[in-house]
Image (cartoon, helix red, strand yellow):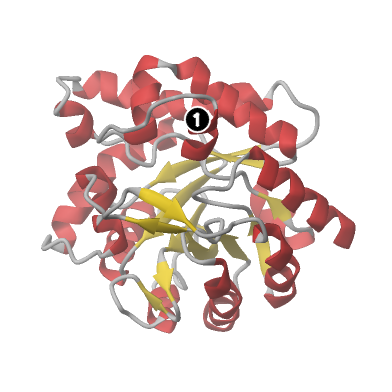
Amino acid sequence: MELADAVRREVVVLDGGLSTALELAGHDLSDSLWSARLLLTSPDAVRAAHLAYFLAGAQVAITASYQASFPGFARRGISEDETARLLRSSVELARSAASDVEGQRWVAASVGPYGAVLADGSEYRGRYGLTRQELVRFHRPRLEALCEARPDVLAIETIPDVDEASAVLDVVRGGGVPAWLSYSVRGDRTCAGQPLEEAFAVASDVDEVIAVGVNCCAPEDVAAAVAVARRVTGLPVVVYPNSGENWDAAERAWTGDGSGFAASAGEWVDAGARLVGGCCRTGPEAIAVLADELAARS
């Protein structure tokens, strides 16, 4: 079954933060390539993290390509051909993990924002000072490489502003590969400060977009965003917020309590969410609780 068909029938469980699962397994991700580095150095670890989420109840794995890009790998002396292979491998590793479990599973190829490649927190600000065409030139080759591996969907995620979303959709439009568009938000606006009505509207005329929503945000920001997304686009909504803890950039540490992450899932589903998972600080254990919560409602 195509993912687009599945979400019209049922709520689909996404995985949690890939970096969280990798760190729980003992991997050091203090690197500008973040989890994408393990595509090069420890691909088996990436596969194992995807498998852990599938075994926890996730139906969709989001690949390790969030911070993977041609410029980022080039800074490590990696050729364009090898970079394209690594991007394709991110999809192949998730697909391989899915083959170890029973039941329908899907692979979402992560397309992170330009700001993630800068590794300086820019993905939570946007407004990089680049033109639309420069953003298109950055995103096109990585999208092409990912699409060559035939993912079930492109996860255009953690996008901080409408300008970048529009540029990425320029590349996606007409390509025939399904995609979801997910913004990073604060309250009722994108991280760059635009109203969510404007943000979601850019996806309304792109046939490839099967869902819109938010991720890498506070759980309390989700329900209102779902309502806006449904009203503006009429599309299924994708949500995968953080655990509820807060990142202290000065101390480089997480603070707060994320134990209640899954408790709000019913509210999100009632508001119209159809793809539900977690982002930062939500590991396989949190996704297992989420999957149980959603199963109990069906």
For image coordinates 57% across by 58% down, the residue present is 257
Nearest the eye: 180 or 207: 180
Question: Does residue 234 sit above or below 84 in this rendering?
Answer: below
In terms of secondary structure, where does tag 1 sit?
Answer: helix
Image point (18%, 62%), residue name = 132
169 horizontally vs 32: left or right:
right
Q: Nearer the viewer, residue 211 or 43?
A: 43
Q: Which image quarter: residue 296?
A: bottom right
Q: Residue at x 33, y 40 (%)?
A: 67
What percent of the width, then of the height, locates residue 138? 21, 46
Q: Amino acid at mark 1?
A: Leu
Residue appearing at x 16%, y 27% in the figure: 74
Q: Residues within 10 Å of mark 1 (few under 14, many from 20)?
A: many
Q: Is residue 281 shown above or below 130?
A: above
Position of residue 227 in the picture relative to residue 102 (left or right) = left
- Indicate the position of residue 180 as horizontal and vertical percent values: 50, 57
Which quadrant of the figure contains the C terminus? bottom right
Q: For residue 103, say whether it is visible.
A: yes
| Quadrant in the picture for the N terminus | top right
Q: Which residue is mark 1?
A: 22
Q: Position of residue 181 (x, y in %)?
A: 46, 60
Q: Quadrant of residue 97?
A: top right
Q: Is residue 298 visible?
A: no
Compare residues 137 and 72 and report the one nearer the observer: 72
